[in-house]
Image (cartoon, rainbow, N blue to C red):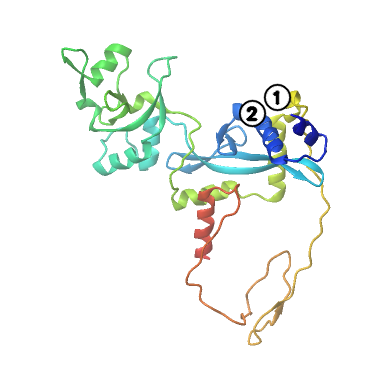
Amino acid sequence: MLQLRELLSGKHVDNPPQALKIIDIVLRELASQRYISVGRFFYSPNIKKPQTLGNGLQSWRGFYQSIKPTQMGLSLNIDMSTTAFIEPLPVVEFVAQVLGKDVSSRPLSDADRIKVKKALRGVKVEVTHRGNIRRKYRISGLTSQPTRELIFPVDEEKNMKSVIEYFQEVYGFTIQYPHLPCLLVGSQKKVNYLPMEACKILEGQRYTKRLDEKQITSLLKSSCQRPREQEMDILQTIRQNGYKQDPIAKEFGINIDDKLASVEARVLPAPWLKYHDAGKEKECHPQLGQWNMLNKKVINGSTVNHWACINFSCNVQENAARGFCHQLAQT
């Protein structure tokens, strides 16, 4: 605690990482109660309106925060981030999006069932057929049979009852899509059948599987911002987080300014680029960090047979990095 007080007052301490870690934990506590935590990132559909990525996925805006020692003292570093979450839809609607077709009247083919099973396995759902009782389950698989063919023992004497009859008699719930398979939930010893139409996907589940090219493109579009837009999002996040009103931070004597830090900067002059004498333009002076290769020839051209992209940023999600590499290869 002595090191923490000295660090907050601007004094030199022998072990600053330990004190910085304590401050970081204090400032993350309130955010961890408000947002979905993914590693060192926090996400919420309330930070910015989620954007549809297709196939039952949407992009959520979030932020990364950490305490950094700077020449001005301790600074709170905040950067924005975007990643994919599973859209909290009724399961039947989610299945329709995954397959790209209406499923309300026709049974699923074997190929469709395999695709849906892959998309739903491990996803958490809540039941909607029991009024205010919203029990939650994790999907382990799908039945190979449609709901109308499913029966199970209801007592120790092994008396059988169909899923359709059970839901009608016990819950007064009429199954509208008996041609669809049921969700499998529970343990291997005691598997439960849940009709798709009686379930809704829980909000706040990050999508960890690989995105397709279309989804990557949509994610990149929703995450790319001009500096001014990025600045406005950071300021809005600071206001939403309410660091000045954080009761936990106040107990530790931590006060966060809600304004961005200003630093002096300068623009380095762009160097002249030398090209081959055989080209129409032998020299080029880049403007605003860019230039055109039209009418220019490089001095020593070569073929790139093997190349790689290395992501050193902890703020760039893997899917976004993969999307950049793919677009770079196509350029």
**Callout 2 touching callout 1 (CB < 8 Å):** yes
Which residue is at 70% across, 37% downward? 20
Q: Nearer the viewer, residue 165 or 31?
A: 31
Q: Is residue 169 left or right of residue 100?
A: left
* Residue in front for this viewpoint, 276 or 198: 276
Residue sticking out furthest to the front: 14
Residue 229 percent coordinates (x, y): 69, 46
Residue 50 — which label?
none
Q: Earlier in the sequence, mark 2 or mark 1?
A: 2
For residue 47, what is the image quadrant?
top right
Q: Is residue 66 visible?
A: yes
Residue on which disc 1 sits: 248
Instruction: Estimate the x, y position of residue 144 in percent, counting from the top left.
Output: 23, 34
Q: Nearer the viewer, residue 124 or 93?
A: 124
Quick one: label 1, few (<14), some, or many (20+) residues within 10 Å? Answer: some
For residue 59, side relative to residue 117 (left or right)? right
Q: Amino acid at mark 2?
A: Glu
Give the residue type that dot 1 points to. Ile
The quadrant the N terminus occupies is: top right
Q: Is residue 160 above or below residue 225?
A: above
- Which residue occupies 32% across, 35% down? 103
- Residue at image position (21%, 25%) is 150
Q: CA distance from mark 2 to mark 1?
A: 8 Å
Which residue is drawn at the image coordinates 73% and 27% (left, top)? Answer: 249
Q: Is residue 299 above or below residue 164?
A: below
Q: Which mark is residue 29?
A: 2
Expressed as whole percent of the image width and height from the top left, the position of residue 63 reads 63, 39
- Determine the secondary structure under disc 2: helix
Seen in the picture, residue 12 relative to 294 is either above or below; the reply is above
Residue 67 visible in image: no
